[in-house]
Amino acid sequence: MTTSLPVVINLLAKSLEVAPESITGETELESLGADSLTVIEVIFDLEEHFNIQVGDERPDLKCVQDIADQIDRRIASQVAAP
């Protein structure tokens, strides 16, 4: 399964103006200073990047890997859909 984690890390790093090397999947969004608006903006960017639609559901996202997992699930479900 392809993982969106590197793309998520790069988008968060750019949005928050931090070095991508300082972000891992386990990095907590709060420790990066990412508020809910930042997370939503990153998700919008990911939707555009991967040509997917996440929709209005916003699960509890605590760490960077949570965002990547959400995007990966959406990509997998759209690939599986006829």
Image (spheres, helix red, strand yellow):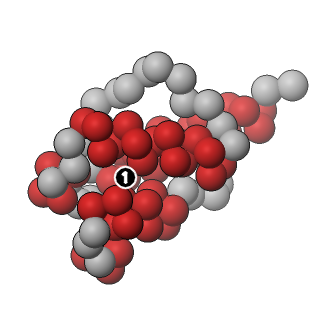
Residue at the spot x=52%, y=48% of the render?
45
Residue type beneath disc 1: Gln
* Quadrant occupied by the N terminus: bottom right
Give the percent coordinates (x, y) of residue 51. Answer: 69, 43
Q: Nearer the viewer, residue 65 or 40?
A: 40
Give the percent coordinates (x, y) of residue 4. Answer: 54, 56
- Is 29 situated left or right of 39 in this image? left
The outermost residue toward the top is 56
Compared to residue 64, the image places residue 57 above or below, namely above
Give the percent coordinates (x, y) of residue 46. Answer: 54, 48
* Quadrant occupied by the C terminus: top right
Residue at the spot x=27%, y=61% of the render?
16
User: Which quarter of the picture shows residue 81?
Assistant: top right
Residue at the spot x=29%, y=37% of the render?
37
| Residue that badge 1 annotates | 65
- Would you say residue 47 is visible in this rendering? yes
- Is 53 situated left or right of 69 in this image? right
